[in-house]
Amino acid sequence: MKNNIKVERAKNNITQADLAKLANVSRQTINAMELGKYAPSVILALRLSEIFKIGVNELFELDASDWE
């Protein structure tokens, strides 16, 4: 799964630590998601979309390998 978390953070001038606090997760969780090492739960994905005020599909997108 691809994501635009880092891009959205930059647009909104939010650090990983600040985003982690807003989303009620650890900074390491934000880092792992940005690196593609962690797929968020539906609840976390919805929280992030609310924080950035964009749709979940704008924040996350499936890779071809996600269909296999």
Image (cartoon, helix red, strand yellow):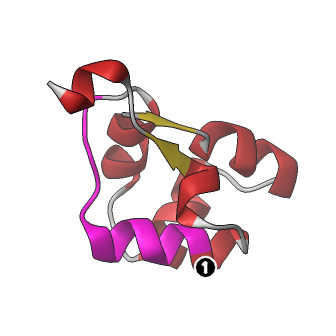
> Image point 59% across, 45% down: which residue?
5
Vertical position of residue 65 compared to residue 17: above or below: above
Magenta region includes residue 48: yes
Which residue is labeled 1 in the image?
Answer: 50
- The span picked out in magenta is 37-49
Q: Please indicate whether residue 31 sits to the left or right of residue 14 in the image.
A: left
Residue at position x 40%, y 36% in the image? 62
- In this view, the residue in front, 14 or 58, is 58
In the rendered view, would you say 25 is above or below 31?
A: below
- Horizontal side of residue 53 vs 18, given as left or right: right
Magenta span has 20? Answer: no
Question: Which residue is found at the position 60% from the left and 79% from the top?
Answer: 50
Give the residue drawn at x 45%, y 75%.
46
Q: Position of residue 13 (x, y in %)?
A: 82, 53
How far from the left and from the top, in percent, is residue 20? 46, 63
Q: Is residue 43 above or below residue 5?
A: below
Secondary structure under the numbered disc 1 in the rendered image:
helix
